[in-house]
Amino acid sequence: MTIQSLGYVGIGTPDPDAWAQYARTVIGLAVEPGEAGDFARHRLRMDQHPFRMWLTDAESGGVTVIGWEVRDPAAIDEMTVRLKEAGIDVAIGTDEECRDRQVARMVHFTGPLRIRTELFCGRRLAPSQFVSPLGVDFVTGEQGLGHVVMKTPHVQEAVDFYCEVLGFRLSDTADYPWGTFYFLGCNPRHHSIAFIRSHKNEGTHHILCEVTSPEEVGRALDRTREHDVRLMATLGKHANDGMFSFYMTSPAGFGIEIGTGGVQVDEDTWVSRTYTADIWGHHPVD
């Protein structure tokens, strides 16, 4: 596996200021406003990285950029060859783009759902310690930034691209009454990206922010009541990745999952299976 982890995501939203306030007061991320001429309105921190998410103005809400961290420049070269052999146009990140992302080197291309997808190495870590405004500890490290789940009618094409070209494993699939999910991993985290078959629309389903304890999940659930945040799904536990979590609606319309206790995948022994139900909970909220 050449790709190491989900490094960062760009988020487009009609109201970046509202999303930044939500990130700070409900999720517990540290928010750093952008300056004049900056590529982002706000940058969001959850660990020692300079940012894991950023916010830009957009007519509709969703993930606009997905950045995958690779080991070193040789891995960038290897992935570039694989992409070009698959007929993908690959562009080299400019000096300005690398400064924006705070990386040593980066290439980018158009991935599934026409999302700008970046491969980078040499991330410059922040000089100051991350401090959550709510005292929240997030699970990142070698597992990277949580996961992203995208919905598309072209789900098999997306899965094939990530597995056959980018080298992800198929961790599991899940056939639920509301859709079929394909979970893809690149490190011990069960999945760093997933796709759900959707015949209605295409876009972002949710982003996971994993925390360190059930108490942190419960406190986040209390904050949804305090700030009148609408739930997408009730508290529950997934059968495939073991995540104890709930889902809420972000100000941009897509979901944020707050969870803990995700299983760690052992590549030598893991067996991909198909699930049809969660252990309990995660009931959709109308």
Image (spheres, grey):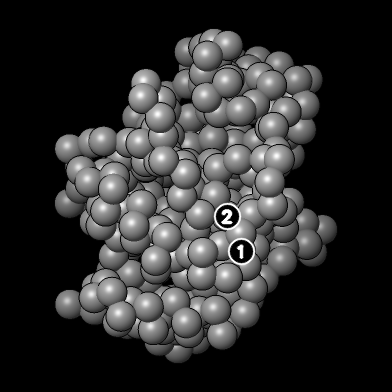
Per the rendering, the mark at residue 46 is: 2
Residue at x 58% of width, y 21% of height: 99
In the shown orientation, is residue 190 left or right of residue 266?
left
Q: Amino acid at mark 2?
A: Met
Q: Are marks 2 and 1 in contact (CB under 8 Å)?
A: yes
Residue at x 39% of width, y 84% of height: 222
Viewer can see residue 269: yes
> What percent of the width, then of the height, locates residue 67?
54, 35
Viewer can see residue 187: no
The picture quadrant where one finds residue 277 is bottom left
The picture quadrant where one finds residue 39 is top left
Q: Nearer the viewer, residue 275 or 233?
A: 233
> What percent of the width, then of the height, locates residue 19?
31, 53
Mark 1 lies on residue: 138
> What percent of the width, then of the height, locates residue 159?
48, 43
Residue at x 58% of width, y 20% of height: 98
The C terminus lies in quadrant: bottom left
Q: What crowding class fits label 2: few (fewer than 14 Cα within 10 Å), some (14-19), or many (20 or more)?
A: many
Q: Amino acid at mark 1?
A: Phe
The N terminus lies in quadrant: top right
Q: What crowding class fits label 1: few (fewer than 14 Cα within 10 Å), some (14-19), or many (20 or more)?
A: many
Dot 2: element: loop
In the shown orientation, is residue 70 left or right of residue 148?
right
